[in-house]
Amino acid sequence: MRLNFLVFIMTLCYTLTYAQNDIPKNYFEKPLDIPLLLSGTFGELRSNHFHAGMDIKTKGVTGLAVLASAEGYVGRIKIQHGGYGKALYIYHPNGYQSVYAHLNNFSPEIEALVKKAQYQKESYEIELFPSASDLKVKQGEIIGYSGNSGSSGGPHLHFEIRDYKSKPMNPFLFGFKEVKDSKKPQIFALHAYPLGPLSHVDGMTERVQLKLIQRNDGSYRTESLKAFGTIGFGIDTYDILDLTYNKNGVYSIVTKLNGKPIFKTTFDKFSFYESRYINRLIDFEYYTTEKRRIQKLFLEPNNPLSLYKDVYDNGIISIQKDNLDQSFEIIVSDFMGNTQSILVPLTTDFKENLIQKSIKETEYYAKAKSASVFEEGKIDIYIPKDALYEDRFLDIDIQGLSVKLHEPGTPLHKSITLGFDVSQYSLEDQSKFYIASVTPWGSKYYVSTYKKKDRLTTKVNEFGTYQLFEDTKAPSIKPKNFRDKQWVSNFRFLKLEIDDEDTGIDSYRATVNGEFILMEYDYKTKTLVYDFNDGKISDTKNELKVVVTDKVGNTAIFEAEFFRKN
Ligand SMILES: [Zn+2]
């Protein structure tokens, strides 16, 4: 009986220990047969999201063989114009998934399956979920070729490892020791924030950037910071790996007050649903104007991010009148354990009658935890619950069919619905209307516009100016590598350039002699490409027809003849 209990306890201990060290080391191999150099790391702060994998440099070119990182089967293939472009997901027997994105094309076997589905659906964009027996892969087997598809800003392979719940994890947790990093994280800037109504730092009631002084050992300190009340800090930091110049994300940040840890963030794992909370983690207003990201080292309400650990008093420091001098320290680490630190000596400095940052009161007050509706003239605004992180007055100005919707520096977590009443216009006019976001320098960007009776609506996830416009211009279609009536027997590809000035391309369809042909569209180069290797063209004389429609339904048709010896 006693022995059984002991065995039970030992098993329990083993299970608990095992659960923590559960991550298989060296199970995954690098997915490219070239030195592993990274242009992006896990958790890096990006627009509205955290980077979910590592970006592997591909020597500036596309077409490098991409290898299955471990055995398994191709369980998902997704092709989209934006996002991950051509992406492939391998499901592994141990429950993990590996993801390979921005590919140029797939291995012949996978490519054949993809093309078949695309011709069946008559669409470039598809998503497939092959079964476990369809496309089994061995470790190191070629599954595709690296590219620059989707919203990739240059040739590279985006590689991810996800757990059995599809949560992306830091690939470094699995090994990939080949990546060398002997350099410390870099500190670009440190900022102090007065947080309470009577708080101040350096005599200021608003954010202050602190001057960094490098010490003999390479670490930093600041001059003694005179402060009072509740205050917090924010850091602008990045990491540099060996052999590359790219600015990557750091792994962990710890802060200590008088030697005691009070705040920690670590990028081991997150959920995709959390990603947009990055706008709560960073100083969003600063980002909007400066295009640099300050990571706040304190927690505010409505921030459920799972990256925080060991947080005391939300990482906020409270300096009272009778406090003696204190010391605050920030330690930034990369995954390989290189650290950089900043020491901030704190001196209590009580000041009265400081000028407080005034809050502009308006007739539009919105609460974070409930929905708000505002209506004026021809425009109505619906702000759902949890769209805002904080209750606040909104600065709204409606002029006819244009609305200045508060300040772009205030982050939005959920979309706001805008409605424009266009009943005063004829149905014909209405059919060409769309809503666009207008930047302060006058550029306009189409936002998805929906029509319901005499009302146009849109959902926007950023504050800013939105206005009604009209698009009557059809898209343009131009041949890129051929002329009408040309012999193209030796051509591998047929290329066209398509563009639309106002609202952008909504759909395109190409046929040869009346039969659908698959054209791949790359929005970055505005190019449509047909691959003759698809084997769909067997006639000598061929009629090509390409129909392109913009987002309000203006349509352009391009027709040409080409000849081919078969
Ligand atoms: Zn990436």
Image: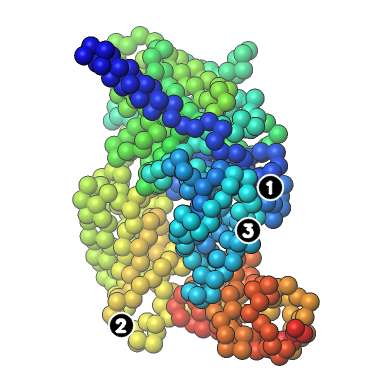
Disc nearer the start of the sequence (2/3): 3
Disc nearer the start of the sequence (1/3): 1
Disc nearer the start of the sequence (2/1): 1
**Amino acid at the residue labelled 2:** Gln
Q: Give how far across and how far down residue 543 sits, in percent.
A: 65, 89
State the residue at coordinates (22%, 56%). 372
Label at residue 516: none
Q: Give how far across and how far down residue 347 sits, in percent.
A: 40, 14
**Amino acid at the residue labelled 3:** Ser
| Near-viewer residue (493 or 323) | 493
Label at residue 107: 3
Which marked residue is nearer to the observer: mark 2 or mark 1? Answer: 1
Residue 168 in view, yes or no: no
The residue that disc 2 covers is: 424
Q: Is residue 314 above or below residue 393?
A: above
| Near-viewer residue (86 or 399) | 86
Near mark 2 (Cα within 10 A), the count class, few <14, some 14-19 or many ≥20, is few
Position of 77 compared to 18: left or right? Answer: right
The residue that disc 1 covers is: 58
Position of 285 compared to 101: left or right? Answer: left
Q: In this view, does 487 lie above or below 220?
A: below
C-alpha separation, residue under disc 2 versus residue under disc 1: 56 Å
Do the residues under discs 2 and 1 have CB atoms within 8 angstroms?
no
State the residue at coordinates (35%, 50%). 412
Quarter of the view holding residue 562: bottom right
Q: Is residue 246 above or below residue 399?
A: above
Helix, strand or loop at disc 1? Answer: loop
**Residue lying at the far top of the rendered structure:** 324
Near mark 3 (Cα within 10 A), the count class, few <14, some 14-19 or many ≥20, is some
Quadrant in which the N terminus appears? top left
